[in-house]
Amino acid sequence: QVQFVEFGGGLVQAGGSLNLSCTVSGITFGITKFGWYRRTQGFPREMVAEIAGDGTTNYADGVKGRFAISGDNTRNMVFLQMNSLKPEDTAVYYCKFRTGRGSFANDYWGQGIQVTVSS
């Protein structure tokens, strides 16, 4: 049974920082990519940041220079350091773990954690 533990969300003032963490257990195969996505009410879920097994990162334009993603394969954990937060960063944040590649890829999604940035 795949289980997630997410923590680090909450309420912060604009300009502040939060550090999200997510760990997964019950995955049989090695993780090939870690990611964070978010969903704002009324909008589809969007990619925030991803990091591949070789360390390659990909960020949404709106968070470049403010957010940093890192992953730990040995502990099946992914982190998202969020600095200089803005009200528009308010959303439910979801961690994602991918195993395999291409047509053999499987994605596992966390249950989501609320981040609220006040102006």
Image (cartoon, rainbow, N blue to C red):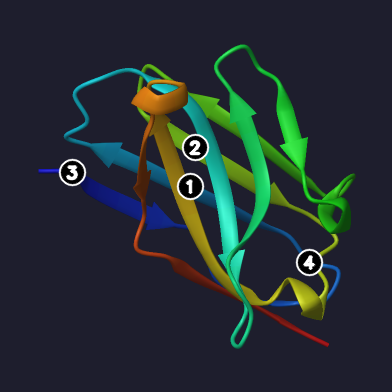
The local secondary structure at tag 1 comes to strand
Query: Contact (CB < 8 A) between labels 1 and 2?
Result: yes
Query: Contact (CB < 8 A) between labels 4 and 1?
Result: no
Count of labels in the image:
4
Task: Name the residue tied to disc 4.
Answer: 16
Residue depicted at x 37% and y 17%: 74
Badge 3, how many Cα within 10 Å: few under 14, some, many 20+? few
Q: CA distance from mark 4 to mark 3?
A: 33 Å
Q: Earlier in the sequence, mark 3 or mark 1?
A: 3
Query: Contact (CB < 8 A) between labels 3 and 1?
Result: no
**Within the image, what quadrant is residue 18 found in?**
bottom right
Q: Is residue 99 above or below residue 4?
A: above
Front-most of residues 54 and 12: 54
Q: Position of residue 42 (x, y in %)?
A: 61, 88
Task: Name the residue tied to disc 2.
Answer: 78
Q: In the image, which is nearer the foreground, mark 2 or mark 3?
A: 3
Q: Is residue 43 above or below residue 104?
A: below
Task: Name the residue tied to disc 1.
Answer: 21
Kind of residue indicated by mark 4:
Gly
In what quadrant of the picture does the C terminus appear?
Answer: bottom right
Q: In the image, which is nearer the foreground, mark 4 or mark 2?
A: 2
Q: Position of residue 90 (x, y in %)?
A: 68, 77
